[in-house]
Amino acid sequence: MQGIKNITRSRAQESSAAVERLYITMRHLFNRGFYKPMGISGDTLREALLSLRPEIYGSIAEEKAELSGLLYVIERLPVGIEQCRFINLTSDEGYSKSHFKAIVPPKRKRNCYRIDDEQMNVEITRGRSDIYDILTHLTFIFIESHKIKDRVLIDDNGEIARDWVKLEQVIASEEKLTLIEREQAISHVSNVLGRTFAEITDIYDAFGTPTAPDRFLHVIYWLGKLAIEEALGGIKRTITFSPILRERLGHHIHGEIWADNIKAVLKQNGLLERPIHIISANMHSVMNSIFAPNMLKSKFKDKTDFFIFEELSKSGNNAIRDKVEEFALKNGMIYMPDTSGTNIDVQIFDTAQVDFSKTAFPTAQLGEDKPVIVVMDYAFGEQAYETIDELLKPFKEGANRTLLNVESVSIMGKAGILEGNKGDIMIPSAHINEGTGDNYPFENELTQELLSGQGIPVYSGPMVTVLGTSLQNRDLLKFFNESTWGVIGLEMEGAYYQKAIQSASKIRKSINPNVKVRYAYYASDNPLETGSTLASGGLGTTGVKPTYLITIKILEQIFNIQ
């Protein structure tokens, strides 16, 4: 008999198991209805996150505090959440019609409501991925809060380090800090966090807001304060899931309302039976690609189209952007701001009303049945399945059912890249769903050759659809990249879009079985490269050229431009 080999697990296998544990644990806690993140019920979640050590959370497993990861998370959670002992995840339950003012995090569209000093309600209308996102972020900040507690609490009797006492005095004063007072406070905080004075100074202003320039100190203070009170026998922080949320989740309630609204507008405008092209993109690139170059050429003489797109993307140029939008609305565009709770706005372009001689596509060949373009803003994770699945269903009016004549679905988004750099382009040949054996090969109408030769590196190959960008770690990604999977990048929606498209076209036959699909992504980060993860900051104007290059290639195919 062969001897049993001494089997050791690689870091990639451990990481894969940790992702699976996180996924299962979060679903279990959701079904249970509540848990205490730093209590026994939160053990598995904490241990799995510490075992995974995601790139975005940097030094989460070390004693010193993680500053870039904390900034990344704080920008995606509501202001003041660090002060709350009770965090309640709810569905859309009518708070928008109350006196409570919605708090929207700067980098993540979700409505949150501060109920009282101790409770924050966070509205979940974008499906399970939104829950995974929030729970991993909260687990991270609670782990960080306990690192602060460990440095501040000198003994079990509650004796506190002098640095913390000094920080408490600064917070209690509520006065605007002078430069000297701020630097003194940073000096004390650097001991509390195990970070250098220079490291804290570098990131300090990024936490600030116009009304709270010293917000960094307040975030650290409240995280530490609640952890210290927990350790000394106080009330433990608790996360609850409202009964309505638990009842509604997975039933496509918001997605169905959203899709029905779009079909109703198509019907009202006599567009329902025309050829339809769906594009998932942002709310400016399709509109600008069609109308901006021709409209603004006198303002930007002798400048390239990409220069015009960059100018439109700059934060101070609202007036020019508004002009382009105004022109588009008079020339066949219908704008549908979201009212369903999905946070996905929509634009509908009726090409029959567009004078193509005044656009960037004067040679467009549209045939007799002029196409209709439906542009939807980015979905979030599993929400992609819910929205596209509902959109591709027939339009029902009484006993009548109208099948949609969907000719193509195009997905343009940003993703993490594993071989290149920020701003490079990825053309997927298949989507692999992480944590399962599910994989979705497809024929992509966009090819590497089509987008090459424009000064931007283009990569082609399978891409992995991940549970959350905040859960990725180097070992797992290297395995996907270097093994026979040959993965070139990671994103959060691709497999969900393709699953919905395949079921509608191949099984349910609600749309054309030969529907064309186009997928292309530009790189927002490289999680394998230190200093290039999402926590290192945005793309700036680096993302403008790839965004518009992909958009233009999609439109050229829809407009039959050779």
Image (spheres, helix red, strand yellow):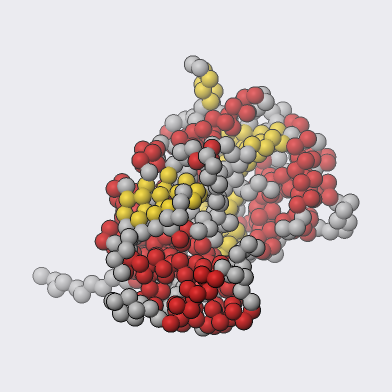
Judge from the rendering whether residue 259 lies leftward or rightward of residue 283; answer left or right.
Answer: left
Query: Is residue 140 depicted above or below 405 in this figure?
Result: below
Query: Is residue 537 depicted above or below 292 in this figure?
Result: below
> Residue 289: x percent and y percent?
73, 48
**Quadrant into which the C terminus falls:** top right
Q: Nearer the viewer, residue 407 or 154?
A: 154
Residue, far left: 1
Q: How many marks?
A: 0
Judge from the rendering whether residue 72 lies leftward or rightward of residue 291; answer left or right.
Answer: left
Q: Nearer the viewer, residue 380 or 72?
A: 72
Residue, far front: 173
> Residue 372: x percent and y percent?
66, 34
Choose top left, top right, bottom left or bottom right for residue 369.
top right
Q: Nearer the viewer, residue 267 or 163?
A: 163
Residue at 72% x, 58% y: name it.
315
Query: Is residue 90 depicted above or below 206 in this figure?
Result: above
> Residue 150: x percent and y percent?
36, 76
Residue at 75% x, 37% y: name it.
329
Residue at 32% x, 71% y: name it.
10
